[in-house]
Amino acid sequence: MLTGKVAIVTGGSRGIGAAIARKLASMGANVALIYAGNQQAAEQVCSQCREYGVEAKAYRCDVSSFDQVKDTVAAIKADFGTVHILVNNAGITKDGLIAMMKEDSFNAVLDTNLKGAFHMIRHCAGIFLRNREGCIVNISSVSGLMGNAGQCNYSASKAGLIGLTKSVAKELAPKGIRCNAIAPGFIRTDMTDSQTENPLVNLIPLGTMGEAEDVAEAAAYLVTAKYVTGEVLRVDGGIAM
Amino acid sequence: MYFEAIAKVIADRVGCEVSAVKPESTFTELGIDSLDTVELLMNLEDELKIEIELDQPVSTVGDLDKFIQSKQG
């Protein structure tokens, strides 16, 4: 279904990003995996992708750096020839109550989660425009839709991603480039290990936390849904409805 | 200096004669919107093998020519 396509997945070494990388590879896409620090995990995900008969390569990059992203996208283009799909999944948390939150904690989360996506889109846009084809999936969060006490920085970054998604969708639609977002709820990953005791988990209508693969299924849908753009698809067991 | 190359890319793009593209022609007159202008710059980057970071608005073909000249020296 995606044979010959090239997909970049940021934050691809574990959790939701790894699941999306494997899913896109299973659909035939070659995968450029961007990771922040865990090379071993990134290489392992690449190996899993290659089992589907596609090319996969890991690139270390701090997405909060405009210049690093520029160089990394150029390297991916040189290695793979082009880019068709961009999944902005890289994200961090630095939770804390707003009355106590340090400026650095707020900035770091915004820089990676929101500016990181901007940097990636900014540097892939030229490739997409030249191809007159492109698909962007931004991984937001129900935290960006509903807010979440103790996560003002994370919520702000994820709400910002929704605005970014819709603006980019409107701006690039005339050129055949789509941009959508996914808002996962409580998904079992390293990042949500601390959330299993969160009382909100008991409020999930479907009664359980989701799996990274559930989000990957949604990403696969958005990548192939040719008439869908500017959408925010909740994958949350119904918690934010 | 870059005018001829720019005019050729524009003429190819909008389907007019190269001679119809004048330095004073505005992109609006030529039927090129802001996003088309970005695409046009990318075509020019490919054609001229240069990198163009458009950091100011340009309204005419002559403005774009001068802008690229100022960046390329």
Image: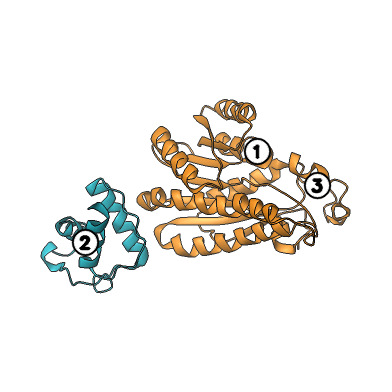
The x, y position of residue B50, in whole percent, is 27, 47
* Camera-side residue of B5 and A201: B5
Give the number of the mark in front: 2 or 3: 2
Q: Marks 1 and 3, how far apart in space?
A: 16 Å
Please state the chain letter of the residue tagged with numbered disc 2 in the rendered image: B
Residue drawn 47% across and 36% down? A3
The verdict on a common chain for dots 2 and 1 is no
| Res. A1 in view | no
Whether residues under marks 1 and 3 lie with C-beta atoms below 8 angstroms apart, the answer is no
Please state the chain letter of the residue tagged with numbered disc 1 in the rendered image: A
The x, y position of residue A146, in whole percent, is 74, 63
Whether residues under marks 2 and 1 lie with C-beta atoms below 8 angstroms apart, the answer is no
The x, y position of residue B56, in whole percent, is 35, 65
Q: Which colour represents chain A?
A: orange
Q: Would residue A98 appear left or right of B40 to someone viewing this image?
A: right
Residue drawn 17% across and 61% down? B7
Q: Would residue B26 appear left or right of A109 to someone viewing this image?
A: left
Residue furthest toward the left?
Answer: B19
Image disc number at residue B65: 2
Residue designated by label 1? A19
Q: Which colour represents chain B?
A: cyan
The x, y position of residue B64, in whole percent, is 25, 63
Instruction: Tell me the crowding category of disc 3: few under 14, some 14 to 19, or many 20 or more residues within 10 angstroms, Cα based.
Output: some
Element at label 2: helix
Lower sequence index among marks 1 and 3: 1
Image disc number at residue A209: 3
